[in-house]
């Protein structure tokens, strides 16, 4: 069984002078990276428990430790860099107190719908299958410089490290896009072509505050992948206008399922919820309840120390999600929201994503969320919370009129509220739990 580290060794031998990682002023070749990994692996081998818990960082040193842990046959458990010390200690205890199968490479802690963190175990086989899925579907190659701006304890960015090491490309690590000028400065790095992964909220920031600058780099940006949260059609259309020749991907993935399918909306149509055809190692089935289930070697092995919870989602080599969807006549996966996000109003079951997609196309609205609210007379109603450009007041009657031309009557929100911001999770998803019972 091959591992990602086998490709690192291969490139160090056959193309050792090729640049592997750039981070700020640091530049490191494949030969040097491999040497550092081997040295650190010797210090980690046979030292302590199998699970290596540490804070992630946007650094070359973190990647050295990451690959070294694998090479030393240990499972790495990367956590958020600013995780509170008490929570760090709790996870250390969980990792130390539970057996870790020999083939496990990574344990990624993720917050589920219950709010409780779960340790998702990924095998070496799953990591390589995910890498091959992305290489085949999105065209990773050694000429690509991939800009990593998201945290390396999350599968969104971590999963891009894997294919880059397989193909022998260059990884460029940044500190996110809170400072968009710093992000654009990274794109000044001399190379043939760039690629990156950005959540929809980050793409929206770039389009709002750096549209013209982004367009200046259009000829150098080979592809951009987004995921973790749905992308509004209006945002897709705007980004296609800014980067008309760039491949722009919506991808279906999660820590548990791995990387499943992808859709190039720039060249194959801006279709809300369209996530393309399953990748090389993946297959999708729709359950009788209308939820998505996935099969393939890229699936997680289970939740650390919780076989009962594992059994609720992983059975007979099939991972059952709470995502609602269907496969269209062209074999493309279409997402309709999450089963636990559906809002029941007057007997109608409504996906808030559909309402949000339409509202996002309204002039001046820069972000929004549709939630369930309680009205003392009519009971459950839809409430639209929205953010406007520069905080300008909005004519709500005009907004309602606009929505009525694009949505069925029962999908029109009953209540409206303007806010300074919409609450999101650390990886850019709408934080629907924050608005429950409020």
Image (cartoon, rainbow, N blue to C red):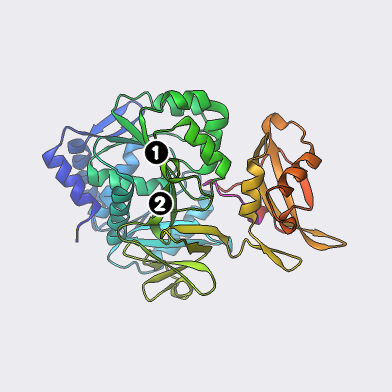
Q: Residue tagged by mark 1?
A: 196
Q: What percent of the width, then of the height, locates residue 236?
A: 52, 41
Q: Residue furthest right?
A: 377
- Residue 404 appears in the figure: yes
Q: Which residues are magenta?
A: 427-433
Query: Which residue is pictured at 36% across the width and 72% down the height?
Result: 317
| Residue in the foreground of this view, choosing between 201 and 394 | 394
Q: Residue furthest left?
A: 14
| Residue in the foreground of this view, choosing between 198 and 273 | 273
Q: Is residue 307 left or right of residue 100?
A: right
Question: Considering only vertical position in the picture, is 346 above or below 178?
Answer: below
For the residue carrying disc 1, how many other residues have a C-alpha within 10 Å: few (<14), some (14-19), or many (20+)? many
Question: Considering only vertical position in the picture, is 329 above or below 152?
Answer: below
Residue 262 numbered mark, or none:
2
Residue 330 numbered mark, or none:
none
| Residue in the foreground of this view, choosing between 352 and 18 | 352
Question: Considering only vertical position in the picture, is 22 above or below 4?
Answer: above
User: What is the secondary structure assignment of the residue under circle 2?
Assistant: strand
Question: Considering only vertical position in the picture, is 171 above or below 162?
Answer: above
- Residue 58 appears in the figure: no
Q: What percent of the width, then of the height, locates residue 30?
A: 20, 38
Compare marks 2 and 1 and give the one earlier in the sequence.
1
Q: Are marks 2 and 1 in contact (CB under 8 Å)?
A: no
Q: What percent of the width, then of the height, locates residue 349?
A: 67, 65
User: What is the secondary structure assignment of the residue under circle 1?
Assistant: strand
Name the magenta segment's main secondary structure: loop
Query: Which residue is pictured at 27% across the width and 48% down the height?
Result: 67
Query: Which residue is pictured at 28% across the width and 29% down the height?
Result: 27
Q: CA distance from mark 2 to mark 1?
A: 15 Å
User: Which quadrant of the structure image shows residue 376?
Assistant: bottom right
Does residue 277 belong to the magenta stretch? no
């Amino acid at each position: 069984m091959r591992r990602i580290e086998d490709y690192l060794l291969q490139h160090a031998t056959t193309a050792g002078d090729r640049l592997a990682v750039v981070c700020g002023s640091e530049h490191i070749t494949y030969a040097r990276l491999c040497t550092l990994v081997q040295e650190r692996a010797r210090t980690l081998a046979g030292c302590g428990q199998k699970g290596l818990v540490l804070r992630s960082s946007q650094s070359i040193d973190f990647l050295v430790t990451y690959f070294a842990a694998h090479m030393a046959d240990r499972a790495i458990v990367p956590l958020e860099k600013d995780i509170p010390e008490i929570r760090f200690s709790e996870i250390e205890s969980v990792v130390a107190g539970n057996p870790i199968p020999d083939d496990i490479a990574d344990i990624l802690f993720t917050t589920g719908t219950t709010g409780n963190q779960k340790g998702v175990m990924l095998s070496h086989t799953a990591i390589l299958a995910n890498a091959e899925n992305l290489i085949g579907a999105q065209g990773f190659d050694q000429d690509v410089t991939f800009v990593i701006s998201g945290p390396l304890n999350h599968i969104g960015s971590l999963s891009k490290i894997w294919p880059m090491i397989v193909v022998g490309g260059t990884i460029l690590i940044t500190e996110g896009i809170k400072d968009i000028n710093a992000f654009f400065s990274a794109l000044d790095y001399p190379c043939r072509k760039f690629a990156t992964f950005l959540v929809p909220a980050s793409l929206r920031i770039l389009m709002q505050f750096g549209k013209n600058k982004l367009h200046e780099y259009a000829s150098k940006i080979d592809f951009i992948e987004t995921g973790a949260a749905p992308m509004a059609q209006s945002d897709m259309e705007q980004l296609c206008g800014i980067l008309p020749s760039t491949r722009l991907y919506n991808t279906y993935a999660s820590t548990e399922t791995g990387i499943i399918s992808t859709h190039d909306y720039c060249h194959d149509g801006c279709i809300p919820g369209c996530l393309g055809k399953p990748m090389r190692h993946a297959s999708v089935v729709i359950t009788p309840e209308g939820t998505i289930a996935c099969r393939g070697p890229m699936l997680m092995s289970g939740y650390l120390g919780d076989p009962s919870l594992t059994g609720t989602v992983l059975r007979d080599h099939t991972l059952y999600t709470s995502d609602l969807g269907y496969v269209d006549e062209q074999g493309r996966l279409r997402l309709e929201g999450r089963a636990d996000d559906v809002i029941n109003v007057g007997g109608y079951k409504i996906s808030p994503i559909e309402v949000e997609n339409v509202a996002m196309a309204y002039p001046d609205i820069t972000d929004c969320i549709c939630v369930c609210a309680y009205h003392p007379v009519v009971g459950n109603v839809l409430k639209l919370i929205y953010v406007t450009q520069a905080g300008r007041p909005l004519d709500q009657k005009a907004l309602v009129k606009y929505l009525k031309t694009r949505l069925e009557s029962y999908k029109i929100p009953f209540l409206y509220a303007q806010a300074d911001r919409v609450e999101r999770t650390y990886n850019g998803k709408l934080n629907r739990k924050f608005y429950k019972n409020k």
